[in-house]
Image (cartoon, rainbow, N blue to C red):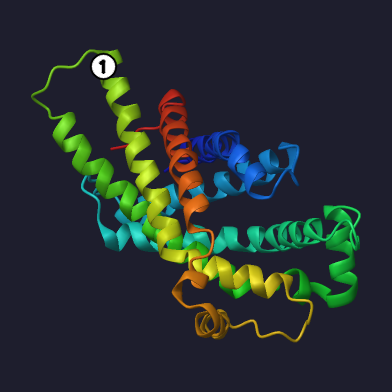
Amino acid sequence: MDAGDAAKEYAAGFAAGVATVITGHPFDTVKVRGLYRGASSSFIGMAFESSLLFGIYSQTKQLLQGEAQSSTPHLQVIIPSAAFGGTIISFVLCPAELVKCRMQVQGKDAATYVKYSGPLDCAIKTMESEGVRGIFRGGLTTLLRESIGNAVFFSTYEFSRYYMNKRLNSPSSTHSYWSKLLTDVGIGIISGGLGGIAFWSAVLPLDVAKTIIQTAPDINTSRNPFCMLNSVYSRVGLRGCYAGLGPTLVRAFPANAAAIVTWELTAKLLGVKRL
């Protein structure tokens, strides 16, 4: 992949991030009871993170495939490409989500006590009291969630896309341009939505552990996600490890469907050839 195509993949990923926020923000607003009234910060953060993820995934995938490009998905290519992309974005997501989680927790008790005046104040005070290690609290858990989750996401997306394409867009079929475009959009909606559901079904327990680790008032709280999940499981059982599963999946399908459709269409408009 030359520099021009790589830049186009990052641009397509940026557009996918914007689509994710537009689609998913109303669900987030309901989930946190209006705490985030505006989406401007989400637009910037999600677009940047999505740009990195899709760009790194595409570049790494092509590097691992080499010259022998194939439309058939291969797990030995998809999994390391997606896991690597997830690992990189975890370093961006961890501090951003720590601030978001702490602001959400504060929002529940805002009538009695306000510790942070805003997200920036939260980040500064965390750095002052806990240092760099504090702002990256939950980093290992975020890395595990993103690397495993994106490996599951892209595997589900690639294989479902491949088999639907094989069935609906066979070489012998004769479709008009608009008919094929609508078919591709439909395939993108289903494969992207299924990928999002697979992502959160696989790693929601890690997200639960991450939230507990990042919002614990005691800085000496264990940062081991498996110890944390064991504690949750011993107290409330498996349902505690999957807290919030329903709302998460309700958001996951449309948000990831929008991301994939936008990514694919933007890449196509920019002239990126994808098998």
- Pointer 1: what residue? 179
Q: Is residue 119 above or below residue 163?
A: below
Q: Is residue 272 above or below residue 159?
A: above
| Residue in the foreground of this view, choosing between 50 and 84 | 50
Residue sitting at x 42%, y 57%: 199
Question: Percent x, y for residue 242?
Answer: 48, 66
Location of residue 155 (image quadrant):
bottom left
Does the rendering let one see residue 63? yes
| Residue in the foreground of this view, choosing between 23 and 168 | 23
Residue sitting at x 52%, y 37%: 16
Q: Secondary structure at mark 1?
A: helix
Label 1 neighbour load within 10 Å: few <14, some 14-19, many 20+: few
Task: Check the picture and name the quadrant holding the N terminus.
Answer: top left
Question: Percent x, y for residue 80?
Answer: 39, 63
Task: Check the picture and name the quadrant holding the C terminus.
Answer: top left
Query: The residue under label 1 is which amino acid type?
Result: Ser
Residue sitting at x 91%, y 61%: 112
Residue sitting at x 47%, y 45%: 250
Q: Is residue 150 above or below residue 145?
A: above
Does the rendering let one see residue 82? no
Question: Percent x, y for residue 186?
Answer: 32, 29
Q: Is residue 228 left or right of residue 215?
A: left
Q: Is residue 171 left or right of residue 16?
A: left
Location of residue 152 (image quadrant):
bottom left
Question: Percent x, y for residue 29?
Answer: 67, 42
